[in-house]
Amino acid sequence: MRFRKLLLPTLAASLTLFAQDDMARARRICAEAVGIDSHIDTIQHVLTDRVDLANRLPNGHVDFPRMREGGVKAPFFALWVPVYYKGAEAVRRTLDLRDAMQSVLDAHPDQIELATGAGDIERIVKSKKIAAFLAIEGGHQIDDDLAVLRMYYRMGIRAMTLTHFKNNNWADSSTDKPAHNGLTPFGKEVVREMNRLGMLVDVSHVSDKTFYDAVAVSTKPVILSHSSSRALSDIPRNVTDDMLRALAKNGGVIGINFGEGFISQKDVAALHAAITSNASAPPDMVGKILDDYAAKEYRADLAAMKAGLATVPDVADHVDHIVKIAGIDHVGIGSDFDGITSPPKGLEDISKMPALVAVLLKRGYSEQDVKKILGGNYLRVIREVTGR
């Protein structure tokens, strides 16, 4: 008995040291990896409250100090426009977000730089700066006009999610009643134009039929910038195993979404509430009145942010499942930070990414494979699509 009493503290101390070693190794790997997160909504925070991302912020999930701590060096900054912005108003709002992004780039050229290809990302990250890769989150933001799409490309935007919470005029959404049976002929033309320009086709948010149509039309790898596995959490925004197989055949990548409901069914009620809130608004709003409404909604989301019921091992379960079905070359991280209210416990903000890496290492992933998940896979797709 006395021996057991002496052994237990020694064993506990050893386990603590092992845990510390795991985290130290995880932090080193995060520091060495390219560090791509394929979806953060942080520019909403900048536009709404004029926050300075160079400072550690009291709310939200992302700022430069926390990005450095988490090893995220090349995020996809989503220029998200709620679906209640219609037509030209959606275009105007997109330009406002692009202007807010430019304000960050102009204010801190020593810390962040625009990246429009894989070579840019590698160069900028090597220089110890953040590589900002820009994406549009919703096809309604082009107002059914390929010229608008081309202008976005000229502004440095290199990805577009084909739909958001509602159908647009040429593609069906996963969270709306089907209206087009997937992509319309114009929707297929959008995909072809994106291929021609060198923009990543993002099929998160789209209906299953739209997903398959986009994969069939695209001559380049597509991405699911912020989705997870439907086999583990059965929500429309997640994808089936057959869709994962099609993604792998296409050469694309899925970025695992940390949001409520995406990882655990325990958080599904919170997800449904978010979808309902973001998909509806009083009609006939334009200009400043509409912007004020959007600001109120975003601030309410910021105030509601707290850890959900999902855990870091739950996120690792999605990695395991996707690797099993699609392969290690087709999984990445698409946290949706600053666009979700309830990330998993232990992944409360972008600084906590090493916690996930530590779990993956314990499950037997090699450092090389972890680095693929932390951006290597996305870097390959970006190079194939943009040609740079």
Image: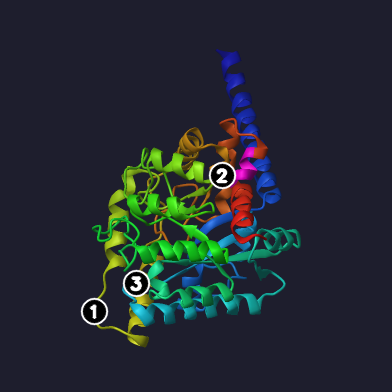
Residue 122 lies, with reference to residue 289, above or below; the image says above
| Location of mark 1 (residue) | 283
For residue 297, the mark is 3
Name the front one of labels 2 and 1: 1
Q: Look at the image and give the residue range highlighted in magenta.
A: 369-373
For residue 355, the mark is 2
**What whole-number distance in Å separates the C-alpha atoms at marks 2 and 1?**
43 Å
Q: Find residue 4 and report its horizontal and vertical position in percent.
A: 57, 16
Name the front one of labels 2 and 3: 3
Residue in front for this viewpoint, 288 or 250: 250
Secondary structure mostly seen in the magenta stretch: helix
Q: Secondary structure at mark 3?
A: helix
Earlier residue among tags 2 and 3: 3
Q: Secondary structure at mark 2?
A: helix
Residue 234 lies, with reference to residue 294, above or below; the image says above
- Report the amino acid beneath label 3: Glu
**Residue 180 colored in magenta in the image:** no
- Report the amino acid beneath label 2: Ala
